[in-house]
Image (cartoon, grey):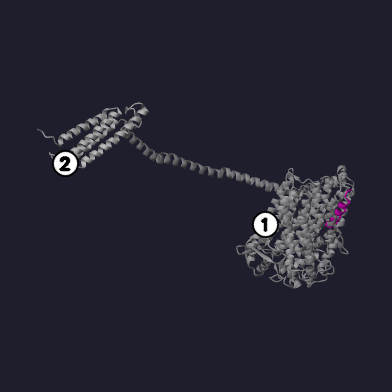
Amino acid sequence: MMSIGLTEYLVVAAVLFGAGIFTMITKRNAIGILIGVELVLNSANVNLVAFDRYLERCRIDGQILALVVIVLAAAEAAIAVGICINLYKNLATVDVDTAAKLRG
Amino acid sequence: MTSHTYEILLALGVLSPFVSFWILVFFGPRLGKPTAGWVGVALGMGVPLVLATVVLIGWRGEVASGNAAELTANAFRYEWAMLGTVPATVGVKLDSLTVGMFFMVTFIAFWIFVFSVGYMAGHSDEVGGKSKYHRFFAYLSLFGFSMLGLVVSSSLLFLFIFWELVGLCSYLLIGFYFDKGFASAAAIKAFITNRVGDFGFLIGLMLVYFQLGTLDLDVAAQRFAEQYAAGTGIFASHFTLFGWSLATIMGIGLFCGAMGKSAQFPLHVWLPDAMAGPTPVSALIHAATMVAAGVYLVARVFRLMTPEALMFIALIGCLTLTLMALIAIVQVDIKKCLAYSTLSQLGYMIFGMGCGAWIAALFHLITHAFFKAMLFLGSGQVIEGCHHEQDMRKMGGLRKKMPYTCWTFFIGVLAIAGTGIPAIGIGLGGYFSKDEILAVAYTRSYEWGKDDFHKHVPGEGGGHGAVEPADGGQAMLASYQDHGQAHGDDHAPAGGAQGIFENTPALPKWMFWLAIITAYVTPFYMMRCWWMTFMGKPRDKHVYEHAHESRLMFIPLVVLAVGTFVSSYFLFRPLFADAAPAATDAAMVMAIDGTADTEAVHHAHSFLIGGVGFAFAVGFAIAFLIYRNGLDLAERIRRVLAPLHTLLVHKYYFDEVYDLVWVKGCILVAKIARLIDTYVVDFLFDLAAFVTERLAAFSGLILDNQGVDGMVNGVAKTTMDVSDVARSGQTGRIRNYVLFSTAMATVVMLVLFWWAMQAGNFMTATSAPPVG
């Protein structure tokens, strides 16, 4: 049986990352983009934990960093949702393409 | 009294009218019409008159006791400023001349001030609709200050300053009614004509300053004599102009000032026009005092004169006295007639100065001041009484309406005509003063240069019965050779008695004869003037009925008439005889005394008794015969002598010639200057402007717009272009940003990966997780 190694974890993380990026690129809904961001962050978490587990040099650092990222994602989600609410208040929609006032 | 006492009294006398001037300037309008006038009378001239009287009485005592010279020498000089290395000193020139002049000026001015109060009461004092009453008396006070300052100045610089001040006052007073065109024109004419003379004065002053290195009268005279004796300084110069040496030019320059002020021949034109001023002004300034300042100046700078300069002075005086007397004959305006007679008499004084009749000229100045002031006041009374009528042809018969004026005027006529009884030596002022001038002229013309002339000169003193001061006799006929011994004291010039006058030429005889002939003309025109005004039948009913006398105005007339009587031989002549040695170290001073018995004097006397002793009677008689029955005979004579009459009425066309030469000349020069201005100066300016404009266009349009602005704009444009490229990435769409950043991250990763592969140390992961 093929043992589950670092490579497999990395593949999962890469798929997650690609899905997240794809979501961010394709979605026009702000919440959808937010979900994409969460996917990217979590793919990073997977990577961190995987490297922490498989690389001897990295003992506990990766897990701590993953916890930091989770907290960061929570804070980011709070702010991002606030932004989305304000976006909706001002434009009566959460379509990010309409919020293009800063376009050069 | 010490000399300081005299100096302080005189200085106070000078300053009092100055105080009066400021009071009237600041508080005049508040003082009101009569009060301001009386303030002017009291403070402006009353105080100086009292002081002058005190000084005069004291000084006569000093002269009698022989202290005068010492007092003069002790006079105080305050160093006012340093002009380079030359100190400008202030002080009172304390001598008999100053004292006599000071008293004369204050005495006459006081009574004219009083007269002015009465005159202004009857005259409009409004100029341009506003009352200028106080201003009139302020000007008079300022004149008093200037004139007295002029008299006491010890320094030529201050003499010049006061000289200009009296000129200013004259200008202000002639143009008192400045809203009348002729008055302001006359004022300007007087002022400008005087400037011409003052220019010469200034040249003389500068020569004194540079060549003699001082401005003090006494020091200058001393240095002049020293330089002559040593042949240095001004006498070492080889500069000549019209054949005159530098020293002569200095003397003539100083005399030019006198020519302007005393209205001598080429510059006489302003004085008749100056009669446009109020009559008291004519009396005070343009007859008695200011115009005499020129004679006074010549007397003061007599010691700086060379024989050539004196000859020039005599020539000018001679021309003036003759030409002006002839004009006076045809004048019909009473004031103009008196003005020309003033000119003629001033000519006599200047002529006397030029002849060396120093004492006689000053004596004549004093006597003339008295009777001419009185004559002018009389004319003012007549004009005032006759409803501002000045034409004598419309007068006549006024003796009944204004008896005081008539008879005081007559006294003046007698005095100016030189009336006297030759045999016993009694007469009015003019009899002595004018005849003495003529006697000196006779001596200069006929006795001068004769071999035996100097032998008959009295050495020490001489018989001098009538004149009481001891010094008086010295000046009897002090020729240059005996001058030093005659005075025998410290008055002798520093260079010794053999002065600059050693080779003085004799006076040309025609000059003397012109003066003699004019002595016959003077009584004629004066009698004509008096007769036409007061005698005969009234010719204009309106004028006659209006005629009246004013009390305030005839009191000064009477006082001055009395003054004319007593100012004759005994009061003033001894004073000037004393002043002669002190004020003029010059050996040129000559005097003919009535009691002298030398041969030369005797000649002069016997000639003059026959020659002009009865001139007054002849002149009077001719005038009486012509004007006895009205103007008809005079009219017939006028027709016979029509060309001559026209010439005289037009005053030898002096005004016309001056107008043509100077006024039109000035305008011509101005026009030429304007042409030069338009076509040369303006062209240069336009050229400069054109060049500037072109340069500015080049620098502005080419350099600035294209160079400097081009750089700035280029920077801006580049920035803009770069920005345009840069902003194309800023779409505002999140997906673009994400895609872009992902792509970049991928690229970076691939590069790193590739780099690591190249280095061969690619991180290898352990295939199995460590346990634990």
Count of labels in the image: 2
Quarter assignment of residue B411: bottom right
Secondary structure of residue under mark 1: helix
Q: Visible in this render: residue B384?
A: yes
Q: Residue at x 25, y 38 (%)?
A: A69
Q: Is-magenta flag for residue B706?
A: no
| Whole-number angstrom distance, CA of label 2 to CA of label 1 | 122 Å
The picture places residue B292, in percent across and down from the top left corner, at 75, 57
Disc 1 designates what residue? B200
Q: Quadrant of the N terminus of chain B?
A: bottom right
Q: Nearer the viewer, residue B728 or B567?
A: B728
Q: Quadrant of the C terminus of chain B?
A: top left
Quarter assignment of residue B298: bottom right
Q: Amino acid at mark 2?
A: Leu
Q: Is-magenta flag for residue B415?
A: yes
Q: Amino acid at mark 1?
A: Gly
Would you say B761 lies left or right of B433 here? left
The outermost residue toward the front is: B772
Which residues lie in the magenta part?
A: B401-416
